[in-house]
Amino acid sequence: MAFSITILAPGKSGHLITQEVERYVRLLRPWASVEILVLKTFSSENADAAHIIAKEEKNILMHLPAGAHAVVMTEEGRLMNSRQFSLWLGNLRQQCSRLVFIIGGAHGFSGIFKKKFEAVSLSPLTFPHRLALEILAEQMYRAFTILSNHPYHK
């Protein structure tokens, strides 16, 4: 069974997907197919944060692949070191064929949305979307190299 990873991230694809992200996506090919879907961000001078969050969450739900294990990336999520992340990812690869990482918009996620899915943290710090995507891509690559005893992690 092939392992497929989708990353849902808000922003503009030309700004969000850097050469480094593209490089890690290529490097991940032996272990997983990775797709990055850049979703529309919602903002308005007249809309409050709760309204924007609700619109973005609705858009995310429309793009979630059926049957996928969804993971919300949030600073309140489970914090792991690289080895723990690799074991977690390896276990998920054994349990499901499709994994989706969800990076939130500028206002984050509602509490209800975060409780609906598994929550993982890249760091207790908040990162710009572009940097969060780069860190996630690198950590996925690092995780698979750890699982494969590849020297990259050392």
Image: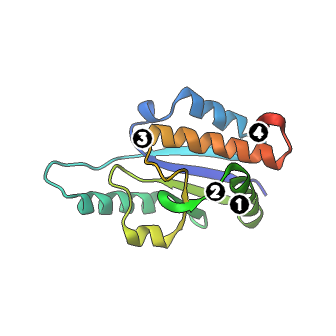
Expressed as whole percent of the image width and height from the top left, the position of residue 133 reads 52, 42
Camera-side residue: 44 or 136? 136
Q: Are marks 3 and 2 in contact (CB under 8 Å)?
A: no
Query: What residue appears at the point 74 percent right and 52 percent down from the top-left corner?
Result: 83
Q: Are marks 1 and 2 in contact (CB under 8 Å)?
A: yes
* Distance from Cα at disc 3 to Cα at disc 2: 20 Å
Number of other residues with Cα within 10 Å of mark 4, as a class: few under 14, some 14 to 19, many 20 or more: few
Query: What residue appears at the point 71 percent right and 35 percent down from the top-left corner?
Result: 27
- Secondary structure of residue under mark 4: helix
- Residue receiving disc 3: 128
- Residue receiving disc 2: 80
- Residue receiving disc 4: 153
Residue 125's label in the rendered image is none
Q: What is the image's colouring?
A: rainbow
Q: Which of marks 2 and 4 precedes in the sequence?
A: 2
Q: Amino acid at mark 4?
A: His
* Distance from Cα at disc 4 to Cα at disc 1: 16 Å
- Residue receiving disc 1: 88
Expressed as whole percent of the image width and height from the top left, the position of residue 150 reads 84, 39
Q: Amino acid at mark 1?
A: Trp
Q: Residue furthest left?
A: 46
Q: Amino acid at mark 2?
A: Met
Number of other residues with Cα within 10 Å of mark 2, as a class: few under 14, some 14 to 19, many 20 or more: some
Q: Nearer the viewer, mark 1 or mark 2?
A: 2
